[in-house]
Image (tube, grey):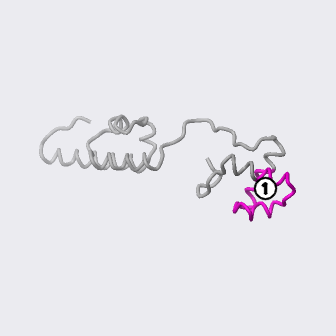
Amino acid sequence: MPRTSGSLELSDFTRGRIVGQYEGGKSQREISAGLNVPLSTVNRVIVQFQRNKKTSVSPRSGRPGPSDGQKRALVREVLRNPEKSVNDVAVTSNLSRRTVQREDQIDGLIDTMTARIKTLSEKKGGSTQY
């Protein structure tokens, strides 16, 4: 994951260009201006290259979280079928139950919708199995 949520991670190609231009004799400021990359990023890439002699980013451990599209699909699924449990939503969305639970927005929607359905059912005199 990038160091800040608003920045994008540099591709291996761009990192290679930074290192190549540095080895070609350009200053970090010239590289930063030429590639439109922050000076601090250029500095970090060069320092990492000098220490480790590699330009690519090491792979991260762990499974990546759900994408923004998957999160939106979860919200749509919950709004479409509010009576579904977390397990049912997880199966439908092809995500793990724990991932669905971690999403505060989804979890809150499910709890709210479930409570609303239970309340309506109790007013009508019916029973629900949750």
The residue drawn where x is 17% and y is 44% is 121
Query: Magenta stretch containing residue 27, yes or no?
Result: yes
Residue 85 picture location, percent across and down: 31, 38
Label 1 environment density (alpha carbons within 10 Å; few <14, some 14–19, many ≥20): some
Query: Magenta stretch containing residue 26, yes or no?
Result: yes
The residue drawn where x is 84% and y is 61% is 27
Quick check: 24 left or right of 74? right
Outermost residue toward the left in this view: 125
The residue drawn where x is 80% and y is 45% is 49
Q: Which residues are magenta?
A: 18-46
Quick check: 56 left or right of 121? right
How many numbered discs, if any?
1
Identify the residue under disc 1: 43
In which image quadrant can residue 31 be found?
Answer: bottom right
Tell me the SS state at disc 1: helix
Outermost residue toward the right in this view: 25
Query: Is 15 in front, or is 80?
Result: 15
Query: Is 40 in front, or is 102?
Result: 40
Q: Main secondary structure of the magenta part?
A: helix
Residue 103 picture location, percent across and down: 44, 46
Residue 74 picture location, percent across and down: 37, 46
Residue 79 picture location, percent across and down: 30, 50
Split into 4 quadrants, where in the image is the C terminus? top left
The residue drawn where x is 37% and y is 47% is 73
Query: Residue flagged by tag 1: what amino acid is it?
Result: Asn
In which image quadrant can residue 6 be found?
Answer: bottom right
